[in-house]
Image: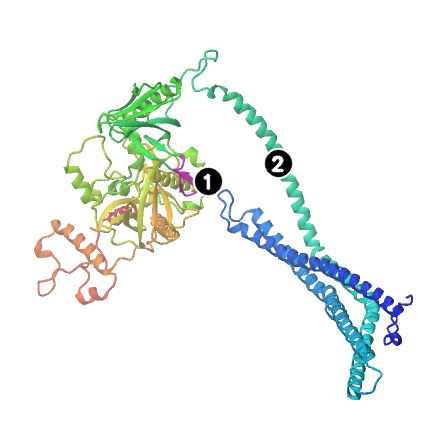
């Protein structure tokens, strides 16, 4: 290292002009060095702040990636591949953020600390010493001037001594200050060569350590494989996006060409004539509706109208509600199932293309306006077609209406269910069937009615006695009479469980099984409830036994409806709501045909328990039938002592016609009838035997087994 220029300390007291000139050079150098060091400190501080910001930004980025899964995107599934990938990226970013935090700490120790120390301890000291040197130099000049003004006469010796002592003190102070000031300026020349290099050297060392740790944290085989797979996936998505963009452009061109005739509200003269389609049974679109205001004036509002389930519905743009995973909304404008509903052209407010939907029964008229004559005629034809041909009652019910309504809600009564069990063995759990289920859209009956309520027998009788006007109303969705509903419950069932359920609705389906079919029916019923603003649900007590399923009215303990186990073909729980379940039943019509209906309920607890109970009941019933067919004693026939005595009594009474009363087996005191074989001599033996023998005519036991099998 070359020699460093210094201030000579020996010349500090002399304070010659040459020394002063050299001192001014050192002072100027110190001032420039201080300014440069301050700027260097600002640059290093920016690097330090940027590193801290980078660390915080990386942490925030990782946190933002993790919050993607809790955003509840309507079009994104909860456990999508994108969510998993972003969570994996966030874990890698956490590792990188940790390494960046270490780098920020190293910057603070090896770069910022030496530079801050040099500024505060050295450069600030030189500035302070400069001020002290100027003060000491000025005081020395004043003391020397005062001393030189002393007169030559020795009249005042005391003043001469004091002036000499002041000059001594000021000169000593000036000399000491000069020595310290010169030494500090000389020391800065050495410190500038270390304190300016140490921060940069610390910066490079920290960066090298950072890159080494980063390579260990990031350059892993698992990360390389992950990035390779993600890159391939992203490239594939880009290709799909490119293809989809091309298809979209072509589709847009096609739609624009096909929609050219729709841009004109009223077709121009040179456009080809497009006749209205008068065979439609469903239609939707915007119409202008006349609405009364203040009982005198009227206004026309643009409203979206559509037909749904035999009803004319309206919906505003902001009127949207969610049911399940599908959005439905709408308000009922007019029920096309009412008697005397019709659509016809009309003239109103000097407007064109106006028509009205009139209900003679409710004296209601809805005045609407279409954009052109074709739209008006299609709306009129669609509404009239729905009134006449959609299967809803209008005036006298058509045969098609009767058949569809009977096929939707009719189930077998208790007597018919018992008679058919001889030839219809109970099936095992059909939810585990290997038969592929049809799609829900293929299994729905077009425009099928939906039953939303159950009626107890007491309510049924009350409704029958009061005459009603308008279309006939179903008072029992399963077409059972009060006699059937009031049948006695099953007392001797080997398996029985009770649950509290609420009836949501039932509708006819085309197939007897399929999980997607049940789920689709649930969505249809929930959507219909939302559209028609049906919120009331009938609560019942569901009794599941190995013989049947019954819905009991909790208010009066009467049977609302009963399902025979052989007629229950499939059951399933909703895939998203564990409290919803549905089951499909077979219904035999009067003509001998078989239809299927899906019934949807909501459970107070978990619907899985109800489906498990149905599975257990069917297994027990099926096992009993198989054992009886094989001639074995059913394992589930565990009669109580009371039932055995009752059966013995009935058998003895049947034989009373062939015997005189004097020949009846009586007890010695003549007060009791002995329920045993004639061979049994003692009553005590009969009472001690848990299974007393029974005397039956030939073939009677076989009939009894067959009867029990049919009842199961």
- Magenta segment includes 201: no
Horizontal placement of 61 versus 619: left or right? right
Is label 1 in a helix, a strand or a loop? loop
Residue 433 in the image: above or below residue 160: above
Horizontal placement of 502 versus 457: left or right? right
Nearer to me, 689 or 592? 592
The residue singled out by tag 1 in the image is 435
- Magenta segment includes 320: yes
Crowd class of label 1 (few under 14; some 14 to 19; many from 20; radius 10 Å)? few
Horizontal placement of 552 versus 187: left or right? left
Q: Quadrant of residue 571?
A: top left
Is label 2 in a helix, a strand or a loop? helix
- Taking the spot 57% from the left edge, 55% from the top edge, the residue there is 63
Q: Magenta region: which residues?
A: 317-328
Indicate how the structure is coloured in the image: rainbow
The residue singled out by tag 2 in the image is 240
- Taking the spot 37% from the left edge, 44% from the top edge, the residue there is 582
Q: Nearer the viewer, mark 2 or mark 1?
A: 2
Residue 664, horizontal then vertical, whole percent = 11, 57
Let me know if residue 212 appears in the view. no
For marks 2 and 1, give the CA distance. Answer: 35 Å
Residue 149, horizontal then vertical, whole percent = 81, 78
């Amino acid at each position: 290292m070359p020699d460093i220029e210094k201030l000579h300390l020996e010349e500090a007291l002399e304070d010659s002009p040459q020394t002063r000139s050299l001192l001014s050079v050192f002072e100027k150098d110190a001032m420039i060095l201080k300014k440069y060091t301050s700027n260097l400190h600002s640059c290093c501080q920016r690097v330090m702040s940027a590193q801290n910001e980078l660390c915080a930004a990386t942490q925030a980025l990782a946190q933002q990636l993790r919050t993607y899964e809790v955003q509840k995107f309507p079009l994104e599934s909860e456990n999508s591949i994108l969510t998993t990938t972003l969570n994996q990226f966030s874990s890698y970013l956490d590792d990188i953020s940790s390494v960046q935090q270490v780098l920020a700490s190293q910057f603070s120790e090896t770069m910022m600390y030496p530079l801050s120390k040099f500024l505060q301890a050295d450069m600030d000291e030189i500035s302070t010493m400069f001020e002290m040197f100027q003060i000491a130099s000025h005081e020395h000049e004043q003391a020397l001037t005062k001393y030189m003004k002393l007169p030559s006469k020795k009249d005042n010796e005391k003043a001469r001594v004091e002036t000499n002592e002041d000059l001594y003190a000021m000169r000593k102070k000036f000399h000491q200050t000069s020595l310290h000031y010169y030494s500090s300026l000389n020391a800065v020349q050495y410190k500038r060569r270390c304190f300016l290099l140490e921060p940069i050297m610390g910066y490079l060392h920290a960066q090298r350590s950072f890159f080494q740790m980063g390579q260990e944290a990031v350059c892993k085989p698992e990360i390389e494989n992950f990035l390779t797979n993600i890159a391939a996936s992203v490239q594939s998505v880009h290709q799909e996006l490119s293809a989809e963009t091309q298809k979209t452009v072509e589709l847009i061109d096609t739609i624009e060409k096909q929609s050219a005739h729709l841009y004109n509200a009223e077709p121009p003269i040179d456009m080809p004539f497009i006749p209205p389609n008068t065979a439609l049974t469903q239609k939707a679109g915007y119409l202008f509706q006349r609405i009364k205001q203040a009982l005198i004036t009227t206004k026309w509002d643009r409203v979206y109208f559509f037909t749904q389930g035999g009803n004319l519905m309206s919906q505003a743009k902001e009127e949207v509600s969610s049911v399940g995973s599908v959005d439905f909304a709408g308000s009922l404008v007019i029920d096309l199932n009412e008697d005397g509903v019709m659509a016809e052209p009309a003239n109103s407010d000097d407007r064109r293309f106006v028509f009205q939907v009139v209900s003679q029964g409710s004296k209601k008229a809805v005045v609407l306006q279409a954009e052109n004559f074709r739209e008006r005629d299609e709306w009129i034809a669609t509404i009239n077609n729905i009134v006449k041909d959609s299967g809803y009652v209008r005036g006298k019910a058509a045969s098609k209406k009767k058949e569809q309504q009977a096929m939707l809600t009719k189930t077998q009564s208790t007597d018919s269910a018992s008679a058919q069990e001889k030839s219809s063995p109970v099936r095992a759990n059909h939810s585990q069937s290997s038969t592929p289920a049809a799609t829900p859209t293929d299994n729905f009956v077009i425009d099928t009615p939906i039953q939303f309520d159950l009626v107890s027998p007491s309510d049924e009788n009350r409704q029958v006695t009061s005459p009603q006007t308008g279309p006939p109303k179903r008072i029992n969705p399963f077409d059972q009479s009060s006699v059937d509903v009031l049948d006695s419950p099953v007392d001797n069932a080997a398996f029985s469980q009770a649950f509290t359920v609420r009836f949501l609705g039932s509708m006819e389906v085309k197939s007897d099984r399929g999980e997607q079919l049940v789920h689709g029916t649930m969505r249809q019923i929930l959507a219909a409830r939302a559209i028609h603003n049906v919120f009331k649900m009938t609560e019942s007590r569901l009794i599941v036994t190995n013989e049947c399923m019954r819905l009991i009215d909790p208010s009066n303990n009467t049977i609302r409806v009963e399902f025979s186990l052989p007629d229950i073909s499939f059951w399933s729980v909703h895939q998203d709501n564990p409290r919803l379940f549905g089951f499909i039943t077979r219904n035999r019509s009067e003509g001998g045909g078989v239809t299927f209906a899906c019934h949807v309920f909501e459970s107070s607890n978990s619907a899985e328990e109800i489906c498990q109970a149905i599975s257990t009941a069917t297994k027990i019933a099926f096992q009993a039938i198989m054992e009886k067919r094989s001639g074995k004693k059913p394992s589930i026939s565990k009669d109580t002592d009371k039932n055995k005595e009752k059966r013995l009594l009935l058998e003895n009474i049947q034989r009373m016609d062939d015997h005189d009363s004097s020949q009846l087996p009586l007890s010695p005191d003549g007060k009791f009838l002995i329920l045993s074989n004639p061979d049994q001599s003692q009553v005590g033996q009969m009472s001690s035997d848990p299974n007393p023998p029974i005397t039956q005519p030939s073939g009677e036991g076989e009939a009894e087994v067959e009867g029990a099998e049919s009842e199961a």
